[in-house]
Structures are given as C-alpha cells and as structure tokens.
C-alpha cells in the first residue's frame, strides 16, 4: 500500500455530504416507493411494508379478469393471475443449518 500523495488536498466544505445525501434520498425514494421488485411479486417495498400489497394484488387481479373476459384466447384459455407475494423474502438467505442453530 502506498502513502497518499501529500500534494493532493481534498477540501470538504460540506458539499460532498450534501450531494451524497441528495443522491441517497432520490435513489432510495425511487427504490422503495416506485420500483417494482420481482422477488416480492412486483410490488414496491413500501407497499409490502405498509400492508397495501394485498389490495394492489386484488386490483391487478380485477384488471386481468377483465382482460381475460374480453379476449380469453390471448391467455391460452387459462385465467391469468398476478405474481404471488412470497411468505419470506431474503437478500442473502441463511443456510438451513444456520437457521436451525439460531432457533
């Protein structure tokens, strides 16, 4: 590992922190409230967290039912359903052994 160059001066007038905070607020606002995640049935994390995912899924089902009634041949004559909400969602699911040891 080399020593930092003593001639490089980084001035932080607080702008870097403000820029990082602004980026985080924009990114996580989108990620949690707008982006639909495939691992949680194409819902937003906010919808799942606040308990509105069931209502959203029911609205999706009503839309799919109307589409199916209008043109069932487009669906292979099988009633379409929206993605299910999983019982659990993990970023890094622990192994069964780890779960057993913590029980």
Image (cartoon, grey):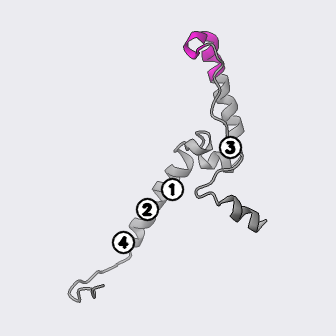
Q: Residue at x 51, y 51 (%)?
A: 31
* Disc number lying in front (3 or 4): 3
Callout 3 crowding tier (Cα within 10 Å): few <14, some 14–19, many ≥20:
few
Q: CA distance from mark 1 to mark 2?
A: 10 Å
What segment carries the magenta color? Answer: 64-76
Q: CA distance from mark 3 to mark 1?
A: 22 Å
How many numbered marks does the figure carry? 4
* Disc number lying in front (3 or 1): 3
Q: Residue at x 46, y 55 (%)?
A: 26
Residue 9: assigned label: none
Q: CA distance from mark 4 to mark 2?
A: 10 Å
Judging by the rendered image, the residue that carries numbered circle 3 is 86
Judging by the rendered image, the residue that carries numbered circle 4 is 15
Residue 25 left/right relative to 78: left
Instruction: Say which of 86 and 99 sits in front.
Output: 99
* Disc number lying in front (4 or 1): 1
Q: Earlier in the sequence, mark 3 or mark 1?
A: 1
Q: Earlier in the sequence, mark 3 or mark 2?
A: 2
Mark 1 lies on a secondary structure that is helix
Judging by the rendered image, the residue that carries numbered circle 1 is 28
Which quadrant is the N terminus positioned in? bottom left
Residue 68 lies within the magenta run: yes
**Residue most extreme to the front:** 97
Q: Residue at x 66, y 19 (%)?
A: 79
């Amino acid at each position: 590992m080399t020593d930092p160059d003593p001639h490089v001066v980084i001035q932080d007038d607080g702008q870097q922190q403000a820029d990082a905070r602004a980026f985080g607020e924009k990114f996580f606002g989108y990620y949690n409230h707008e982006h639909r995640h495939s691992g949680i049935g194409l819902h937003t994390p906010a919808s799942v967290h606040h308990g509105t995912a069931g209502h959203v899924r029911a609205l999706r089902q009503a839309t799919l039912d109307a589409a199916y009634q209008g043109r069932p041949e487009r669906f292979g004559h099988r009633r379409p359903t929206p993605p299910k909400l999983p019982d659990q969602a993990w970023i890094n699911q622990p192994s069964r052994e780890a779960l057993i040891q913590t029980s």
